[in-house]
Image: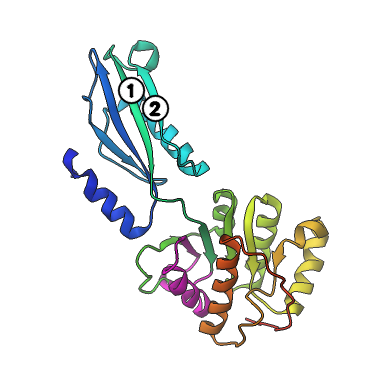
Amino acid sequence: MIKADEWLDVLLRLREKRIPAVILTLLMDKGSVPRGAGTKMIVSRDENWLTIGGGNLEYQCLAIAREMLQSGSQTPRQETFALGARAGQCCGGMTQVLFEPWGLPQPEVYVFGAGHVGQALVAILATLPCRVNWVDERENQFINPPAGIHCLHTDDPCEIAREAPDDSLFVVMTHHHPLDLALAETLLRRGRYRYLGVIGSQTKRQRFDYLLEGKGISEEKRASMRCPIGLPDVKGKLPAEIAVAVAGEIIAVYQGVAYSKDVTEIRSK
């Protein structure tokens, strides 16, 4: 169990995993309050450590911290809370909380597929300043994942695609063409992404365009999907070569680099 004076150790572990967080600090306590001034709590998007007293106060503070993480805010803020019955607290005092963003927000990347190319791509992405979510229906495919990779075994990859944060980067390279198509349709319908790439040849692209058009996906939306994927100047069909090409394209997108993609290299699965 983490003790109250170990919040620095929590931040060190989060830094190793490249996970941004919000540091909550009680600045002022007046009257009856569950914790005194100086008490700290650490909140990431998925977890939290330590406590500022529990109850409705902590519930509200968790919501504020995660909204800051979701929006990428880097501006500290202060909030004052009256801990009376109306707030669902029986203490009756008052406290002020400082919310300090810690760690730069990183691009959220979702890699669907843990085959040979997926494994090679994730190995590269693990070394980059991004948060990598690796998704597959087959749990036994996650063999020795690199440190910091968030492995998601699921029976419904499309549900993860629907629920992912806005402005995420999505790479679709599963073991099953119909699943690639289902994921492409799901992501095109939801929109709100920075990048959508689907592995495959130009022939696969033409087939998907035809099928997606039949499902009511507009040409404008389909144009935002990259297929084939990968920087065309990085050639080769080995998993590592394709992974380097795809990683280069992802880097260009999250760094905001403008480039022309004249696809001359046909990549097939």
Choose between 134 and 247: the one closer to the eye: 247
Q: Quadrant of residue 53?
A: top left
Residue under the point 69% across and 75% down: 228
Q: Is residue 3 visible?
A: no
Residue type, label 2 = Gln
Q: Quadrant of residue 79?
A: top left
Residue 226 image offset from top left, x and y in percent: 69, 68
Q: What residue span does the magenta drawing correspond to?
A: 113-141
Residue under the point 26% across and 49% down: 10
- Count residues near mark 2 (Cα–Cα under 10 Å), then give few for <14, some for 14-19, many for 20+: few
Residue under the point 79% across and 73% down: 206
> What secondary structure is marked by label 1?
strand
Taking 208 as reference, is 85 above or below it?
above
Judging by the rendered image, the residue that carries numbered circle 1 is 96
Judging by the rendered image, the residue that carries numbered circle 2 is 78
Residue 104 image offset from top left, x and y in percent: 43, 51
> What secondary structure is marked by label 2?
strand
Residue under the point 58% across and 59% down: 169
> Does the magenta segment cover residue 118?
yes
Mark 2 / mark 1, whichever is N-terminal: 2
**Marks 1 and 2: in contact by CB < 8 Å?**
yes
Taking 206 as reference, is 239 above or below it?
below
Q: Quadrant of residue 3?
A: top left
Which quadrant of the figure contains the N terminus? top left
